[in-house]
Amino acid sequence: MKKIKLEYIVEHFQNCIEELYVFVDKENMELEAISKEAMNLARTGKKSEEQWMQDQIKSAINVLKDMKNKRFILLPNEDSIELPNLQEDFCYTLDNEDIKQKLLSNISGFGTFRNILEKENLIENWYEFEDGFYVNMAKKWCENNKIEYEI
């Protein structure tokens, strides 16, 4: 049986676009992205003159027709993904109390948090922490939706 690449789900979680519905197609284990506009046109039966939109509408119609069979599983969008305060969580992984406190007091400072990470040579640690969070989120989502994945 085909498996979805976990990186597809991770990338979606990291880069959610508000104007898109993204589905996992369980038949080919690929992602299907459909604009909200195309989905609305498909629901109402309206047409579009633009070729790319016509293709999107066809995809949307396929998804809507298949809702009961559950071939297409909707991925959460940015509105439905609950993100903890990753910056704060990261700070509590640090052993150095001075750096931890400096970062905690600058979480909401525009660019300050990142500047401190760079100055303290922690930027790679931060990216690993953040990536790990999204990988775990993607794994849990796949498991909860009975979607097999490969790393």
Image: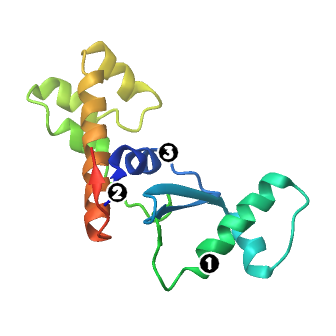
Query: Residue 34: image x %, image y %?
Result: 64, 60
Location of mark 1 (residue)? 64
Query: Residue 107: image x %, image y %?
Result: 35, 37
Residue 36 located left or right of residue 89: right
Q: Residues within 10 Å of mark 3 (few under 14, many from 20)?
A: few
Q: Nearer the viewer, mark 3 or mark 2?
A: 2
Instruction: Give the number of the disc on residue 15.
Output: 3
Residue 106 located left or right of residue 98: right
Q: Secondary structure at mark 2?
A: loop
Say which residue appears at 13% left-offset and 31% top-offset. 94
Instruction: Give the number of the disc on residue 2.
Output: 2
Query: Residue 54: image x %, image y %?
Result: 80, 61
Quarter holding the N terminus?
bottom left
Residue 139 versus residue 71: which sits nearer the camera? 71
Amino acid type, residue under disc 2 in the picture: Lys
C-beta proximity under 8 Å, tags 3 and 2:
no
